[in-house]
Image (cartoon, helix red, strand yellow):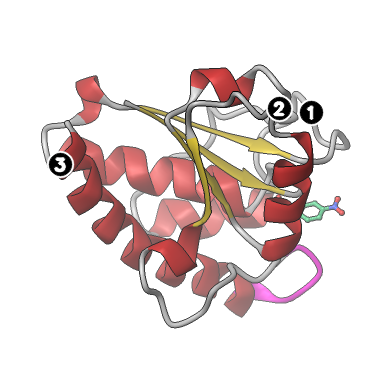
Amino acid sequence: MRVLFVCLGNICRSPTAEGVLRHQLQAAGLAEQVHVASAGTGDWHVGKAPDSRTCKAAMVRGYDLSQQRAQQVNVAHFAEYDLILAMDESNLSHLRAMRPQSAPGELDLFLRRYGAKLDEVPDPYYGGAEGFEQVLDLIEEACKALVVEIKGRL
Ligand code: 4NP
């Protein structure tokens, strides 16, 4: 199974989701069976490591994001991933507009799909440290439900 998380810049929210899901899959013994990646709808940060504030907040909770590099989402991703999960409504609209009609995989809003308190992961880029903690809280919770779904699909 292949899962792709998508946000705007691919340096804050979706790299966090990639790291958290990979960690939870490892703990569940499923890491070998699921390919996890992330991408951004924008191209400003392509090739860069995640935002230093994102890396720092993630590291405190045991997630090492330092090896990740930003990429821009492209049409080929729709053929390669079974599940593409958008961090907010704007990301979802962008993905819907570029999705080929024949795309076999599912496209959905990450938090809404897993019944979280919020529908969208708020963009922490222009805010303070608490925003990065909220991103982690929301993503950790939703990833637990995603792992349950993955177990059922494997
Ligand atoms: P992300 O956050 O979409 O969670 O990676 C952002 C990162 C960079 C920018 C916006 C959002 N930016 O405008 O450069």
Residue lying farthest to the right in this orientation: 44
Is residue 127 highlighted in magenta? yes
Answer whether labels 1 and 3 touch (C-beta < 8 Å).
no
**Mark number, residue 71:** 2
Q: Residues within 10 Å of mark 2 (few under 14, many from 20)?
A: many
Q: Amino acid at mark 1?
A: Val
Residue 9 in view? no
* Lower sequence index among marks 1 and 3: 1
Given this view, does label 2 or label 3 mark the residue nearer the observer?
Answer: 3
Residue 23 in view? yes
Q: Nearer the viewer, residue 46 or 94?
A: 94
Q: Amino acid at mark 3?
A: Lys
Q: Which residues are magenta?
A: 125-129
Q: Nearer the viewer, residue 5 or 80?
A: 80
Answer whether labels 1 and 2 touch (C-beta < 8 Å).
yes
Q: Residue at x 62, y 44 (%)?
A: 6
Quarter holding residue 152: top left
Q: Amino acid at mark 2?
A: Gln
Horizontal arrangement in the rendering, residue 30 relative to residue 108 (left or right): left
Q: Nearer the viewer, residue 19 or 78?
A: 78
According to the picture, the residue beneath numbered tag 3 turns out to be 151
According to the picture, the residue beneath numbered tag 1 turns out to be 46
Q: Position of residue 100 (x, y in %)?
A: 69, 27
Which element carries disc 3, helix, strand or loop? helix
Q: Residues within 10 Å of mark 1 (few under 14, many from 20)?
A: some
Quadrant of image for the C terminus: top left
Q: Position of residue 40 (x, y in %)?
A: 72, 39
Horizontal arrangement in the rendering, residue 55 relative to residue 70 (left or right): left
Which element carries disc 2, helix, strand or loop? loop
Given this view, does label 1 or label 3 mark the residue nearer the observer?
Answer: 3
